[in-house]
Amino acid sequence: QVQLVESGGGLVHPGGSLRLSCATSGLASNVYYIGWFRQAPGKEREGVSFISSTDGTTVYADSVKGRFTISRDDTKNTVYLQMNSLKPEDTAVYYCAADLDSPPQYGSTWLRVLMGQSRPPYRYLEVWGQGTLVTVSS
């Protein structure tokens, strides 16, 4: 059974940085797509960034482009989200999620489909972490 466990959230001042981690366990295939969503109080869940295991392609929401970087370390079975220049509007619970069943895809198109799933039933995203809270405040 695949599990995702997020960590790294916390309180940070505007302009600061945090690195979130999504530790995976139980992955049976080397084809997967993992990414981050966030949900602020009273707002819809928003796709933030995704990365593909097939060719390393990454995609970002416009709201975080140039400030956030997603990466993966296969030796540690972990996906990271480096968040720089944080703003109060980045405050949210951050979730990692994975598509483990789709066939190999290359390029950004499939990642953007996954990132666009902001409402249930989150088709194709079989596994979710429990979330980690990021608060950006002075």
Image (tube, rainbow, N blue to C red):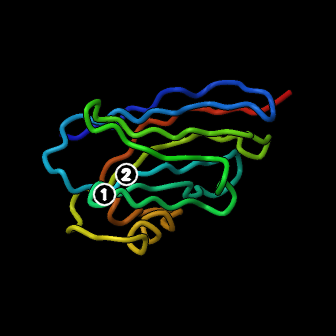
Q: x, y (%) of residue 65?
A: 64, 57
Q: x, y (%) of residue 4?
A: 34, 37
Q: How many marks?
A: 2
At 73% from the left edge and 26% from the top edge, which residue is drawn?
Answer: 12
Query: Mark 1 highlights which residue?
Result: 99
In the drawing, does residue 135 fall left or right of residue 18?
right
Q: x, y (%) of residue 71?
A: 43, 44
Query: Mark 2 highlights which residue?
Result: 34
Q: Is residue 137 above or below residue 93?
A: above
Find the residue positioned furthest to the left.
28
Find the residue positioned furthest to the right.
138
At 64% from the left edge and 33% from the top edge, which residue is drawn?
Answer: 134
Residues at marks 2 and 1, CA–CA distance in whole angstroms: 6 Å
Q: Give neighbour class at mark 1: few <14, some 14-19, many 20+ (Cα, 10 Å).
A: many
Q: Is residue 84 above or below residue 16?
A: below
At 56% from the left edge and 38% from the top edge, which residue is drawn?
Answer: 82
Q: Is residue 70 above or below residue 22?
A: below
Q: Earlier in the sequence, mark 2 or mark 1?
A: 2
In the drawing, does residue 53 fall left or right of residue 82?
left
